Amino acid sequence: MTAAAGHLSSHIFGKKPGAPPTPSSQRKALATHRRRIKAKGFLRLEVHVRKDDAPLVRSIVSALADPEHGAETRALLREHFAVRPTLGLKALLASAPLEDIDLTRPRDLARDIDLRLT
């Protein structure tokens, strides 16, 4: 690794320039931990939320991780926030409630239209 690449990776991972390098034993332990977590189907995320929302986000994550409440929490979140598949125009019109809508219109064929060019 070049000095420039080392500086860039330090910057990306939040290390201060000039800080001592991480010992190889710590790097190996971290890599092993991340592999084990990935094998269990977990994904590491970083989110940015307002300070007031942090406890709420933590409680949601805890509820998702809880074996007793995880399925219920997922179902509730999916019900409210999941991306719904888009419907085509035909399906959208078919699902629209049309009971109280008057779709008839009067035919007015007696209009005078001037088709002359001026």
Image: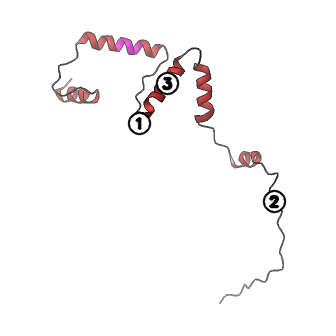
Please name the residue shown 83% across and 62% down the image.
104
Left or right: 17 in relation to 67: left
Mark 1, other Cα within 10 Å: few <14 / some 14–19 / many ≥20: few
Nearer the observer: mark 2 or 1; the answer is 1
Residue 114 quadrant:
bottom right
Please name the residue shown 59% across and 18% down the image.
69
Marks 2 and 1 in Cβ contact (< 8 Å): no
Residue 103 circle label: 2
Residue 59 circle label: 3
Tell me the element at label 2: loop
User: What amino acid is found at the position of numbered circle 2 in the picture?
Assistant: Leu
Q: Is residue 63 magenta?
A: no
Point out residue 44 in the picture as x, y percentages from the top left corner: 42, 23
Tell me the element at label 1: loop
Kindly tell me whether residue 86 is visible in this rendering.
Answer: yes
Nearer the observer: mark 3 or 2; the answer is 3
Please give the range of residues in magenta.
Answer: 31-35
Vertical arrangement, residue 85 with respect to residue 5, above or below: below
Q: Mark 3 vs mark 2: which is more N-terminal?
A: 3
Quarter of the N terminus within the rendering: top left
User: What amino acid is found at the position of numbered circle 1 in the picture?
Assistant: Arg
Residue assigned mark 1: 50
Mark 3, other Cα within 10 Å: few <14 / some 14–19 / many ≥20: few
What is the distance, in whole Å, between disc 1 and disc 3 at their CAs? 15 Å
What is the distance, in whole Å, between disc 2 and disc 1 at their CAs? 49 Å
Point out residue 96 in the picture as x, y percentages from the top left corner: 75, 48
Main SS of the magenta part reads helix
Q: Is residue 34 magenta?
A: yes
Marks 1 and 3 in Cβ contact (< 8 Å): no
Kindly tell me whether residue 48 is visible in this rendering.
Answer: no
What is the distance, in whole Å, between disc 3 and disc 2 at their CAs? 50 Å
Vertical arrangement, residue 63 with respect to residue 80, above or below: above
